[in-house]
Structures are given as structure tokens and as C-alpha cells.
Image: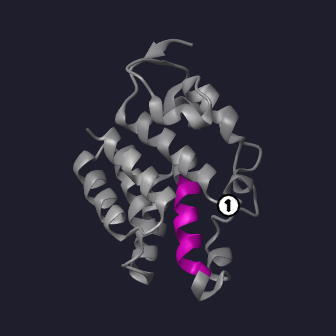
Amino acid sequence: MDRFKPTLTDVFYALTLQEIAAQPGLREELGDNHLDDVARRAFRYELHELSYLGDEVWGLGAQGVIAQLAPPPEDSLRELSRIRAAGADGYYAALCRSALVHLFWGEPLRAESRLAMAIRHNGDGAFAHHALGLLKGYQGDRDGARHELQEALNRETFYDPRERIGRALAALR
């Protein structure tokens, strides 16, 4: 594996891995893919160290590791029928969590679709704007990422998510 300069896509994929790790029970939706192993293969960093990607890293990078992921499980949270079954209270969170899983598998269009539904359902929620900021960063859209992450920061009231949003904003500097 060669050294490489991480792109904005790499940095935001690393932040997405950390966000998945922070969501209760979401690791189980990844099938045979283990977040710690994915982080090590992609960047040669442990999962908890990913917010400190330097100017050069070793590994496969985001696109390289996505190409090697085990396929998603059949009963994944990603299915809309399961999301709808979550009920009104869980619908918004299930859509946001589903978007993170789609981004994990390198499916930005599906992630964006889930986030659009989440924002239509609850436009005042921080989670969808946070996930959309991660998606925009993954796509290389610095301005879009900054806007969505700032929206998330303005709406978020809890310390831990605010800290993760702040790390994502700092990655844009």
C-alpha cells in the first residue's frame, strides 16, 4: 500500500465511519464489515484516530476500501419498508441512519434520497443536516458541507453530536 494525500472524500468518509460508530446499534447493519477493520484498511488508522488524518496516510483510501466491502446484509436497515415500520417517532432517525449506511457503501445518491425524506419529515432536526453535511463533504462540495454542518450545529443541543459536527467543520478549514 502506498502513501497518499487524503482527499476531501477520504476525510469525510473517515468522519462518516466515526458517526456510524457513535450511533447505537448501527454497526450491526454493516453485515460482515467491521468498522475498525475498514478504518485500518482505508487509512491505517484506528477508528478513534480518524479525525486526525494527516497530510499523508497509508492505505486504500475511501474508494479503494468501498470496492472491497462485503455486500450489505439482506435484512439491512436500508430497506424503506423497515424504515416505514419504525413508526412516526423513529422514522426520522431511521432515515438518517439509513443514509449513513448508504454512504458507508459508497451510495451517495441513495443516501441523499433518504436525507431528503428525513428533512421533509422533520426540517428542524439536526441529525439530517449533519448527515447531509457529511455527504456533501464526501462529494467534494465544501460550501454545501459547510452550510449543512452549520445548520446542524445551530440545531443540535447535545454535546457529543455537537463535538462531532465541530470536527467535520474543522476538516473544511
- Disc 1 crowd rating (10 Å Cα; few below 14, some 14-19, many 20+) is few
The reply to whether the magenta stretch includes residue 56 is no
Q: How is the image coloured?
A: one colour
Q: Main secondary structure of the magenta part?
A: helix
Identify which residue, 133 or 169, lies in the foreground. Answer: 169
Residue 153: x and y in percent read 35, 62
Residue 148 visible in rendering: yes
- 72 vs 4: above or below: below
The residue at the far front in this view is 159
- Within the image, what quadrant is residue 156 found in? bottom left
Residue 54: x and y in percent read 41, 23
Q: Amino acid at mark 1?
A: Pro
The residue at the far left in this view is 143
Residue bounds of the magenta highlight: 90-102
Indicate left or right for 66 with 120 as reference: right
For the C terminus, the quadrant is top left
Which residue: 38% across, 64% down?
A: 129
Reading the image, the residue beneath label 1 is 24
Which residue: 71% across, 62% down?
A: 76
Question: Across the whole image, how many numbered discs are drawn on residues?
Answer: 1
Identify which residue, 129 or 104, lies in the foreground. Answer: 129
Identify which residue, 113 or 164, lies in the foreground. Answer: 164
Residue 67 visible in rendering: no
For the N terminus, the quadrant is top right
Which residue: 63% across, 75% down?
A: 83
- Within the image, what quadrant is residue 144 found in? bottom left
Residue 40: x and y in percent read 63, 27
The residue at the far bottom in this view is 88
Residue 155: x and y in percent read 36, 70
- 60 vs 23: above or below: above
Which residue: 59% across, 37% down?
A: 48
Identify which residue, 132 or 168, lies in the foreground. Answer: 168
